[in-house]
Each structure stands twice: as C-alpha cells, then as structure tokens.
Amino acid sequence: MMTTDLSALDFPTLLAALMRPSSLVELAVLVVVLVASGLLVWLLRGMRDRGRAGQGDSIPSIWFGTHLVDGVLFPLLALALAYVARRVLLELGQPLAVFRLAIPVLMSLAVIRLSVRVLSAAFPASAVMRAVERTISWVAWLGMVLWVTGVLPVLLDELDEIRWKVGANTLSLRNIIEGGLSAGFVMVVVLWISAALEARLLAGASGAQLSLRKVAANALRAILLFVGLLMALSAVGIDLTALSVLGGALGVGIGLGLQKLAANYVSGFVILAERSLRIGDIVNVGGFEGAITDITTRYTVIRAPSGRESIVPNETLTTTAVQNLSLADRRVLLSTVLVVGHDTDVLRLREQLVEAVVAVPRVLADPGPAAQLSRLGNDGLEISVHFWIDDPENGQGNVRSEVNLAILGLLRREGIGLSSGPQVLRLEAPAVPLPVKAPAAESAR
C-alpha cells in the first residue's frame, strides 16, 4: 500500500505523478471539494442576506465579498476541505499529486483574498492600496510556484547564509523576509478586526450616539494597531525592551516638535467625549459655516452648502470660539434690510411685510417674522425684517433670496419706493388710466 506524500518530491517527479491514472481520482475529489465549498458559501450568504433584510444591515462583508467566490470564506472552506480530503486519501493509500498543487494554490488564493478585502475595507479610496494589493498577489503566486517546483527550500537555505551582526544578535536575510511577511500578516489581521468592529459600532447610529460610537471606534482602532505593531515587531525579531529608549525619545519629540500634533489628537478625543460637537451639527468656525461630516482623532471635516469642505484641526475647535447653530435649538434667526422713502406709511407696510414673508416656504410661523423700523435717516426709513428657519442644513442664502423676492413683489404691487442715497427709486404699481380734465379756460365757458 503506497502512502507517500509528494510534498517533498521534485518537480519532474510531480509531473510524472500527475500523468498517472490515479490523478483522475484526486481531480474528481477536488471538484467535489470546490463544489461543496461553493454550495456552503451560497447557503451561508443566503442566510446572511435574509438577516440583513430583517435588520437593515448594509455593512460590506469581508467574508463573502461582492460575488460568490470573491470573499475570504470560499478559499478558506476549500482549503480546509481539501486538507481533510488529502488526509483521507493518504489513509486510503492513494498517491497524491493533484492535491500537492491544489493546497498551495488555495492557500495563495486565501492570502490574496484576505489582504485585498481587508485593505479595501480599511482604505476604500486609496490608489496606493491598489498597488499594494497587486504586489501581494504577485508575491503570493510567486511563492506558490517556487514551493511547488521545489525551488523555495533551496532559495531559503541560500538566504539563510547571508548573515550580519546587529548588536548582540545575528540576523539573516531569511529572518528579515520571514519576519516582514509575518508582520504584514499580523497588521492585515489587525486592520480586518478593527474595520469590522468599527463598521459594527457605526451601523445605524446618528447624532450623539454616532459621536460616542465614533470615539469608541477610534480608540479601539488605535489600541488594536498598537498591539498589532508590537506583535509585528516581535515577529521581525526586534527586542521590545529597546522600545523603552524609543519611548523616551518619542516623549522628548512630542514635547518639542510634535506638541501641536499631540494637542490635535487629545482635542479630538475631548470633543468626542464631551459631545460639544457632533456629526451633523451646523457650525461656524473662523467665518466658514457648514455641517460637520466627520470627526477624526486629528481633524474635523466641515462641509458648506456650496459643496466646499474645510479640514479644521481639532485644537482649533477647543481653543477658539465655535458657533454651533444646532447644539440646543435648530432654529436660526435671519434678517434682511430695506430703506424706503420718508412718505411711506410704515405702520401699514410692516403688516404687509409680515404677511408676505410668512408665506415664504421654510419660514416659521411660530416664532413668526417681524418688521421693525430700525433707523431714521436722511436718505430714508430703514426697516429690518427678521424671520426664523429650523433647517439651516438646507442653506440660508436661498431662503433669504426667496424672502427678498417676496418683499420686492410687495413693494412693486404697492408702488413703494426704495431709497438710494439722496434719491428715491420708485417701484411704480401698474399704470391705471386717469380721467382727462379739461383746461381751466374751457371749463369756465
């Protein structure tokens, strides 16, 4: 009974083994493994979609991806089932050839899918990550080919001979490459966990709840990345006791040159913890007004109604005056000013102005608009019109324009003049023909 595993054979022996009729049995088993893996993924994906339909969950899945075999779950299931099938075939005395190729291929596919899905979720709009994903794919497939052909063990032995002494330790090129790969794998796993937890924390949150979950997500990601960095350094072979010196140097650097950066990070956590500013609030900072769309640990993004975005360091928000238009009351008072001639009936015009402004959409009826005679000037009578809105996120200039148009229409209908310096601009009402009087001389006849 032959129970030889071909994992240690060279490439010519593998090719010869693939030509044997017994390889057809392995190929049939491999097809069953792949079909079973695809069926399991399809069933699990259907269960997940039904759960999402009931809960309204729209978080992108790293496990399933966008297609049936696009996520991490399919290659991992196929790899696990292939390993079990390989063990069963060995117990039955089946010589292995196809599975020696299938297992490294599935392992490379799992590594590629894991890295691509995690990096896409952690950095969704990064062009650099696209290049990193392609590099990981090429490295994974190259490693698989070298392993199958038997070149990889020889190459690793040669790399192990390239050594140099660093302090009290002796490092080889093989140690550095293996440590770098291990560190990269650790960081990918950490990014995966942090991205999944952050997506879960932020799902379905809004307002104050969103701010609290945002600070928890930022703190969780920072802790996980710190732990992952320590594990990655340990995997490379760096003595972690040396970090005490690095920590002292880092403290001096923060005290001297990085105090602004550190202040921004501390301010970010203070803002999120105190909830003085929340995502969705309408604020005015340094003359720039807009809605807060994101609060990170270093800066806050404010988007104006015009579409422009301002990135404000968090320290600025904690050390300067910030007008929050939606912290306690979403109602905002707006005003416009007009100057009319001295002969205008101001009492009657005030009532007409209030009626015209309250009819404008978005203007609140409670508290309602008000018209006040604010100044008596040589150039005319200045009337200030005040009105309230409760949706400042929809813009303020547009509703002020609508109010001005309503006022202009009223003045034109009433024939009331607008004063401009020493002259009065008359907005005449539509002309009405008047009866023609006869000359005085003729009427006396």
Image (tube, grey):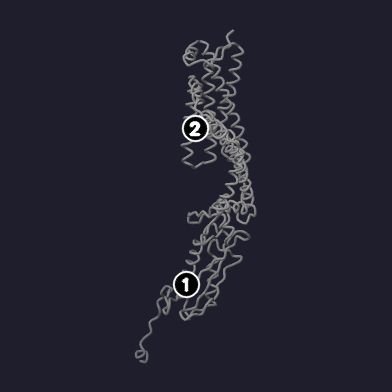
Q: Three-letter amino acid code at disc 2?
A: Ile
Q: In this rendered view, identify the residue nearer to me: 18 or 169.
A: 169
* Residue topped by disc 2: 136
Q: CA distance from mark 1 to mark 2?
A: 71 Å
Mark on residue 411?
A: 1
Q: In this rendered view, identify the residue nearer to me: 153 or 298.
A: 153
Within 10 angstroms of label 2, few (less than 14), some, or many (20 or more) residues? some
Q: Is residue 159 visible?
A: yes
Q: Is residue 140 above or below residue 396?
A: above
Depth check, mark 1 against mark 2: the one in front is 2
* Quadrant where the image shows the C terminus: bottom left
Residue at image coords 57%, 12%: 4
Instruction: Please tell me whether mark 1 sits on a helix, a strand or a loop.
Output: helix
Q: Three-letter amino acid code at disc 1?
A: Leu
* Quadrant where the image shows the N terminus: top right
Residue 16 point in image, percent of width and height:
48, 12
Residue 197 lies in quadrant: top right
Within 10 angstroms of label 1, few (less than 14), some, or many (20 or more) residues? many
Going from the N terminus, do you reach mark 1 or mark 2 first?
2
Q: Is residue 6 above or below residue 60?
A: above
Instruction: Please tell me whether mark 2 sits on a helix, a strand or a loop.
Output: helix
Outermost top residue = 1
Residue at image coords 35%, 87%: 439
Residue 70 point in image, percent of width and height:
52, 31
